[in-house]
Image: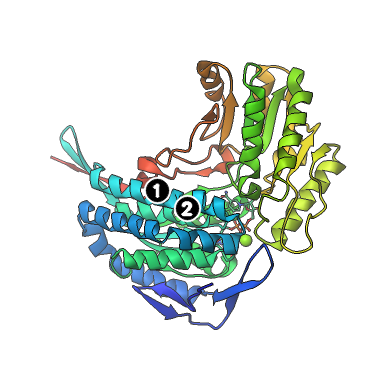
Amino acid sequence: MKAHDGMYIDGAWRPAVGTDTIEVVNPVDEQVLGRVPAGTAEDVDTAVRAARAAFPAWAATPPAERAARLGALRDVLTARKDEIAETVTAELGSPLSFSQAVHATVPILVAGSYAELAATYAFEEKVGNSTVYQEPIGVVGAITPWNYPLHQIVAKVAPALAAGCTVVLKPAEDTPLTAQLFAEAVAEAGVPAGVFNLVTGLGPVAGQALAEHPDVDLVSFTGSTAVGRRIGATAGAAVKRVALELGGKSANVILPSADLAKAVNVGVANVMSNSGQTCSAWTRMLVHAAQYEQAVELAATAAAKYGDRIGPVVNAKQQARVRGYIDKGVAEGARIVAGGPEFPREQGYFVQPTVFADVTPEMTIAQEEIFGPVLSVIPYEDEEDAVRIANGTVYGLAGAVWASDEAEAVAFARRLDTGQVDINGGRFNPSAPFGGYKQSGVGRELGAHGLSEYLQTKSLQF
Ligand code: NAP
Ligand code: MG
């Protein structure tokens, strides 16, 4: 696998100040794919200076020209789709078909949506005797995780660039090769030097330095709630804008009128895809008591079919973490109906697709984000009970509702304390706002809502 031994700063690949490196490991066979520099606070500072220097000219670039660069970026991502899918598969471990269909494809849609938005967004409007301008907020520090390595980068960088901001990105240590490919794509798309900069490195070193840098105007973070909380506190102390996309524990609510088999099968597929490493995964399946045993059986059968078809989780730490949660589920009295804690292979960070029955809403596996292929099936008594259970976690990122009648599902969805709800299996929309209620985060990504995160408002009175 190709790996750059430098950082992409101010339009060129430059050596890091220090000599430390990060090993990139293939989660399927545990082989080292390559090494990238482990950046330090000095590298972050160099990158932030480059972003600051590039800001005035990029902010003053007409939106149509920024749109043209984003259109070119979309085209480069399209041309290099296969290479992107192979790179994500190598460092994340997801099956190549999934990398092609999702990891490499969604970023093209998102980049394309921002090419269009940059060209059409109302950056200026009249309000009575005022003219209100939407101006770029400045230098953005973007910190991203490994689970959708390119999507999470594009969901921050594309709107930031569309808004006229400049960016320093610190990607996850597990998936830096995808980030390096993205930097190449930005260069190929003709984005001016310094507008986008990449510093690879460790979270507590490079990530923290970026979040704390006084010349960063907005920190946009996706990852764990624990780190997000600290980044929010740091940003608060500096009176700095912050956007946080954090964890989830979403409910898939199957109302009695729904097509049970379809709802269960789609629900299981949702949790197992990407080996359960999806913040918006519907990891709690809520089923009416009268249909509970039937649903459990359907879910167990569906999960067993996945067997070896799902990829590993990203690293040994996540593998151990997921097993810890499965052990905890058993210890707290839940019943395994598919999978289990034993690792299915000697090599690679594989976890069995696992389904728990007899889960009560207060169990650890029903409250905490597991981030692995583990589903909890929970019975409810009536609609009120279902609402209470669905809303009964600290999270509120996503969810699903199934009913024979769309209006019934919508009425229920409106009662959920969550940022996104899929109705009867609804399709992904790359322009719909994505983000969390409660401790799932602050702010929204994607579409026009995602663009507005990178803008600040000025009004002139006449
Ligand atoms: P994480 O530590 O929060 O990682 C997210 C990003 O933040 C990475 O780039 C990480 O760098 C960086 N980071 C870590 N510590 C930091 C700090 N002190 N200051 C600034 N940046 C920092 O998440 P993780 O350890 O990869 O995963 C742990 C759990 O988080 C998962 O099991 C899952 O529950 C949750 N998670 C949620 C999402 C989501 O999309 N909501 C995504 C990933 C993980 P490193 O890569 O060097 O750690
Ligand atoms: Mg980490």
**Which residue corresponds to the image point at 63% horizontal and 27% vertical from the top-left?**
262
**Which residue corresponds to the image point at 52% horizontal and 48% vertical from the top-left?**
245
Disc 2 residue type (three-letter): His
- Name the residue tied to disc 1: 110
Q: Is residue 297 above or below residue 311?
A: above
Indicate the quadrant where residue 374 lies.
Answer: top right
Quarter of the rendered image showing ligand 1: bottom right
Indicate the quadrant where residue 131 lies.
Answer: top left
Structural crowding at the residue carrying mark 1, measured as other residues with C-alpha within 10 Å and reported as few (<14), some (14–19) or many (≥20)? many
State the residue in front, 393 or 294.
Answer: 294
Structural crowding at the residue carrying mark 2, measured as other residues with C-alpha within 10 Å and reported as few (<14), some (14–19) or many (≥20)? many
Residue 409 point in image, percent of width and height: 55, 20
Residue 322 point in image, percent of width and height: 74, 51
**Which residue corresponds to the image point at 68% horizontal and 56% vertical from the top-left?**
312
Can residue 236 be seen from the camera position used here? no
| Mark-to-mark CA distance, 2 and 1 | 8 Å
Can residue 202 be seen from the camera position used here? yes
State the residue in front, 234 or 221.
Answer: 221
- Name the residue tied to disc 2: 151
Q: Earlier in the sequence, mark 2 or mark 1?
A: 1
Q: Is residue 259 above or below residue 73?
A: above
Disc 1 residue type (three-letter): Val
Instruction: Classify residue 371 as left or right of residue 52.
Output: right
Residue 213 point in image, percent of width and height: 45, 66
2 and 1 marks in contact (CB < 8 Å):
yes
- Checking the image for residue 22, the label placed there is none
**Which residue corresponds to the image point at 73% horizontal and 47% vertical from the top-left?**
307
